[in-house]
Amino acid sequence: METEQPEIEGTQRPKRDPNEIISLASLLTTTFDQIQSRSIGTSVAGIPTNFYDFDAMTHGLQRGDLIVIGGRPAMGKTSFSLQMAKNIAQIHSLPVCIFGLEMSREQLSYRLLSMETGIETGRLRTGRIAQEEWACVGEGINKLGELPIFISDQRNITVKEIIEKSEKIKKEWGKELGLVLIDYLQLMDGPPYETRDEELAKVVIAMKNMAVNLDVPVVLMSQLDRELEFRENKRPMLSDLRETQAMEEHADIISMIYRDEYYNPETIDRGITELITCKHRNGPVGTVKLLFEPQFTRFRNIAA
């Protein structure tokens, strides 16, 4: 007998108008309904990513939240965020929009196919597929092709264009979006200001406004300052984010990705990735650990 899955809040509720001013009494009625449905297990607070320890900390990705994922190159921030997007589309049947400013649509599709099939990206790209693997490739393509995942690799894209493209997908599918993903902040164009820091600060503010107005979690990836490479302890901190002040003020969650084996090949934590949440507006901070399979650019939960 199949178990009915709890409803994700926000998928069935009326359209939220952030410009409307409403009474506290109305808000409290909605609040009570949410508390009641969560208490009996008919709904969950946010959108689960299927990374269990991360979901336990965040209660899922919340609609209207801006989530920043930071990391140095080769840490896995794109792979982690891409897998979150895939999980949300695959498990919850919610449309997700991916804006890849660094990688092409084709590169992102190869990564997703490698995650799905467990066949290395390099072999997929060169066609070095064993005879017995072709069925797996075909099945993976069919499964991914059914998912509501939409990818843009437009360079120098603006926030206005991201909003327009996301609203178009939302309208076409007739349901709330599950996620908007941007890879990554420092490649975006913003309104002209005297300094690049001011320009990107305005982009961060606009991203938070977009999350609220579209009522969707927005995941924004960010590079970290290269100065951390010269520290003895290379685990990232909040101050390592570029454009730190704007993100500290406006992001709801800031998480950093760190793999110790990248710097210390003899570490006992080989294959382990740390997801360090150093800001959480509505909950705890801390570190969760995931298994990383670099050949498939894929993360897995660590079994209890």
Image: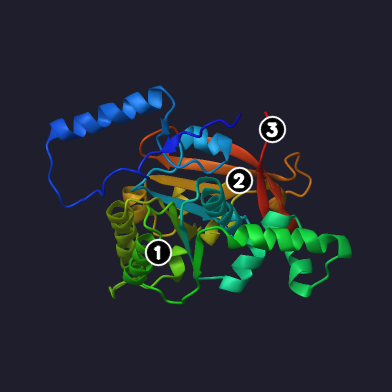
Which numbered marker is on residue 126? none
Quarter-of-image position of residue 29:
top left
Residue at x 60% of width, y 48% of height: 258
Q: Amino acid at mark 3?
A: Ala
Q: Nearer the viewer, mark 2 or mark 3?
A: 3
- Residue drawn at x 56%, y 50% is 90
Task: Give the residue furthest to the right.
Answer: 131
Badge 2 or badge 3: first in the primary sequence: 2
Q: Residue 9: percent from the left, percent from the top?
A: 37, 39
Q: Which residue is mark 1?
A: 169
Q: Earlier in the sequence, mark 2 or mark 1?
A: 1
Q: Amino acid at mark 1?
A: Ile
Can the viewer see residue 126 in this picture? Answer: yes
For label 2, the SS is loop
Relative horizontal placement of residue 178, taking residue 296 as reference (left or right) = left
Q: Quadrant of residue 161?
A: bottom left
Label 3, on which residue?
303
Q: Nearer the viewer, mark 3 or mark 1?
A: 1
- Identify the residue at horizontal 49%, vertical 65% (top origin): 150
Report helix, strand or loop for mark 3.
Answer: loop
Q: Residues within 10 Å of mark 2 (few under 14, many from 20)?
A: few
User: In which quarter of the view is residue 105 placed?
Assistant: bottom right
The first of marks 3 and 1 along the sequence is: 1
Q: Nearer the viewer, residue 59 or 74?
A: 59
